[in-house]
Image (cartoon, rainbow, N blue to C red):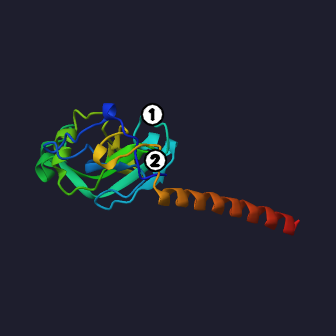
Amino acid sequence: MSDFLPSSSSSSVNPSYGGGRFYGGGATSAYSAGRRSPLGLLPLGLGLATAALIFPGIWLYSVYNYPYTNSYRFRNGTRNRTTIERRQDQGEVMLPITCLCQEFNACGCDDNPDTSYLDPIIGDGTNLNSSLVHIGPVNGTQTIVLNGTLPNGTDASETSSATSLSSSGIINQRILEVSGIWAIGGIVAATVMFL
């Protein structure tokens, strides 16, 4: 997979959260999904079925999960509680955050400690933008799930033509192809030897 993203000024999106400083996933600049985020967050690969269970929607390719170390605290307006329960925790909820990016797209996920970008996205949890955020179970824990997928061509300062590849990208691709051939050859040789 190349570090470069396709350039297209027609689909470019600018950061619009946290005073125009952040994308919806917390990043200040876009990068290729599946790569380390600008603040060093490493992705975990998810299958399409798992992604659809975590964040309902149409996922065309594999999805990368960026689990954040920071949680988000907000006043939950959807809870219907007794007066005693409200006095105990003042209706505040603290949930872990994870962000998903679709493979082959630009990504705007980053574990940003400045949660001002989440205030307009989540608010009190009652009027969520369903294309950007979902609150639901992930591994049995209620979690804020952000869709950090951005249109290709986002943040042109870090993008280039889809057809251009770095020389190290070509070398890495060739190594992966050759290692796959050797693995298949080893399996065939072992099978023939043990028959």
Residue at image coords 33%, 45%: 145
Q: Is residue 92 visible?
A: no
Q: In what element is the residue under mark 2? A: loop
Q: How many residues crowd mark 1 within 10 Å: few (<14), some (14–19), many (20+)?
A: few
Could you say which quadrant of the image residue 36 lies in?
bottom left
Disc number for residue 186: none
Q: Judge from the rendering whether residue 115 lies leftward or rightward of residue 40; answer left or right.
A: left
Dividing the picture into quadrants, the one containing residue 147 is top left
Kindly identify the amino acid type of the residue bearing the numbered disc 2: Ser
Q: Position of residue 39 (x, y in %)?
A: 28, 60
Residue 162 seen by the camera: yes
N-term mark: 1 or 2: 1
Confirm or deny contact between disc 1 and disc 2 (CB under 8 A): no
Alpha-carbon distance for marks 1 and 2?
Answer: 29 Å
Could you tell me residue 53's position as x and y percent?
45, 41
Mark 1 = which residue?
58
Which one is in front in this view, the residue at disc 1 or the one at disc 2?
2
* Residue 5 position in % (x across, y down): 40, 45
Quadrant of image for the C terminus? bottom right
Above or below residue 187? Residue 51 is above
Q: Is residue 116 left or right of residue 162?
A: left
Say which amino acid is labelled 1. Answer: Ile
Residue 51 or 143: which is nearer the viewer? 51
User: Which residue sits at x=15%, y=48%?
Assistant: 116
- Percent x, y for residue 129? 27, 33
Q: Which mark is residue 164?
A: 2
Residue farthest top in this picture: 10
